[in-house]
Amino acid sequence: MGSNSRRIVFGGLLAGVAIIVVNVFAQRTVGDRARSDMNAWLPGSADRMSLGAGALAAGMIFKLTIGVLIVWLSAALRPRFGPGPRPALYASMLVWVLGAIFFSDYPMMGMISICAYVIAELFQLVAFLLAAWIGARVSRN
């Protein structure tokens, strides 16, 4: 693994930590509304979901992986868009749009209200932008 690859992985892990921090804050502010929406859709469904140690560990691993993906994509876009924050912005926006498309069926099925979905997606956008900025600062040449 070259030194640039190490910086990309290290920057990606820091970016993943930023995503985790923003998501914890989002859970504290929007989580209750999302759970009540899910219980309205299927009574007791959110109450039956358990967030055990395995689920928390998997979620953290996924978020760290997303951080590395954003920083790697940002580094891959750098030759095309030049140095600076623009490649990181594009990388974070791409990953965010793909995630928003992937989970867009939740409000369509009534699992979550449109308002709660939009708020959650805005938190996710902030998390990805912050992650891309942090990762780009650490991994740049």
Image (cartoon, grey):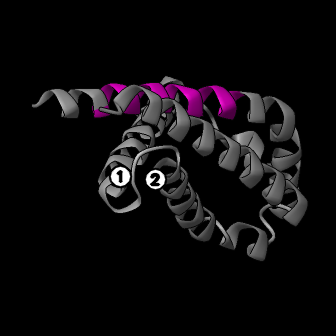
Q: Is residue 89 magenta?
A: no
Please tell me whether the stretch drawn in magenta is mainly helix, strand or loop: helix
Q: Quadrant of the N terminus?
A: top left
Say if residue 10 shows up in the picture. yes
To which residue does mark 1 refer?
Answer: 78
103 or 37: which is nearer to us? 103
Q: Quadrant of residue 58?
A: top left
Q: Residue at x 41, y 59 (%)?
A: 81
Q: Secondary structure at mark 2?
A: helix
Q: Position of residue 69 (x, y in %)?
A: 37, 47
Q: Which residues are magenta?
A: 8-24
Label placed on residue 5: none
Label placed on residue 87: 2
Q: Quadrant of the C terminus?
A: top left
Kindly identify the amino acid type of the residue bearing the numbered disc 2: Pro
User: Which class describes the residues within 10 Å of circle 2: few (<14), some (14-19), or many (20+)?
Assistant: many
Q: Position of residue 8 (x, y in %)?
A: 30, 34
Kindly identify the amino acid type of the residue bearing the numbered disc 1: Arg
Q: Residue at x 78, y 69 (%)?
A: 107
User: Which class describes the residues within 10 Å of circle 1: few (<14), some (14-19), or many (20+)?
Assistant: some
